Image (cartoon, rainbow, N blue to C red):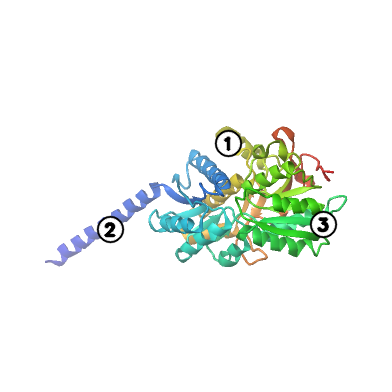
Amino acid sequence: MSPKVTFSRLLKAAFAAVLAVTVTSATSYAEDLLIGVPVPLTGGLSQAGRLVLGGVELAASEINRNGGILGRKVKLVVDDTKSEANASAMVATKMVTQDKVYAFVGGFGSTADYALLQSIKRYQPIFIHAASQSVKLEKGFGDQPWYFHVYIWDYHRQKGVVKFLEGLSPKPKTVAIAYEDGLFGTDAARYAKDFLEPAGFKIVMQEPFKTGTADFSPILNRIKNLDPDVTYVIGYAGDGIQINRQVKELAVNPKFMLYTESGAKREDFGEAGVNAAFIQDYAPEQRTPRNADFVKLMQKERPDLLPARSSAALGYTGLMTLKESIEAAKSFDRDAVLRELSTRTFDTVFGSVKYGPSPGGAKHQLLSEDNEIVVQFRANNGVDVVWPQAAATGKLVYPLR
């Protein structure tokens, strides 16, 4: 074979290789951008899980309507974690190894999500954790460069509780705490004690319960006898609804009821919910700069999400921060996107925020106690933001008697 023929063949082979790379790149660029959304769609946490999913879906719809991300349509790969640890671990592993998702946005339920993250830790995917607040998650995964957490951690919530209670007049002196016995509730109750007692509040009860309990009368009768200034319930949506109903049935007549928000809707509480208060991160009624636009978007495209509290906003914000970071990087390169996620300031429905270090050691935490608000339920399914004053739409009713 002559040198000329050899060179010609090599040139053709090289040209073919370049063409193959070009075609492959173009095809890849045109493909859907797969985003994994592991959330509980069945089981005890399904109500809040569906709201997180609704927020992610709303963001994906908005993104695709405006041309996608760098020309690629967002396609959500959704699977049910069933509110269980084993199911969560299997779902997440499947999304990484079989579905080949580009990134994750989702999660809800601390115990289930710990198993989920443990199962995929070795793959180091871009993971934007919309919800779950147990510090066990922060300790286990917060130092990972690929892990970004939108929701507050337990201590953020409890710092917010102290700030709120300290501003009440007359200032309450005694607090009774009822908490669910999973990771979420036990960590939150511990931090509540750590922050409330040094602030001068006396904790007269700390009683655990199992999520999904049908009869809370033993706990509520104890609260009735203790008659604390504040009854503080740390649990999931179904727990709060059932406790609130039985408070009325048993004529507990509390001085003040404060719940942790976990995706419940006002209408779920009915008339028994009048003047129940919830500490949370977001409410459609709050006065923050981007919130009005977000509410209009929900009214137009997903009115089913409007009664929701923070869960939908968390899912929406998680995907939008990923979208903005990819566009700022002008690339889908993992390291470039991680750099943008780590350094950018995002204009969100919660205000102007950025992923930064948290007191517990997480590298990338978005919200804090500064984003906490308190809402109070009114008659006829009404809701008012009552704290802090800058976000308030109504006045707190306190004490209730």
Badge 3: residue crowd in 10 Å (few <14, some 14–19, many ≥20): some
Q: Amino acid at mark 3?
A: Thr
Please tell me which residue is depicted at 70% across the width and 39% down the height of the picture. Answer: 285
Question: Which mark, residue 174?
Answer: 3
Of mark 1 and mark 2, the one earlier in the sequence is 2
What's the residue type where badge 2 is placed?
Ala
Residue shown at 50% from the left, 40% from the top? 61
Alpha carbon of mark 1 to alpha carbon of mark 3: how far? 38 Å
Foreground: 192 or 2?
192
Q: Is residue 250 left or right of residue 338?
A: right
Residue 389 vs 142, above or below: the answer is: above
Q: Distance of mark 1 from mark 2, alpha carbons?
A: 51 Å
- Circle number at residue 17: 2
Residue bearing the label numbered 1? 304
* Residue nearer the viewer, 69 or 52: 52
Disc 3, SS:
strand
Is mark 1 in CB contact (under 8 Å) with mark 3? no
Give the x, y percent position of residue 214: 62, 48
SS label for mark 2 = helix
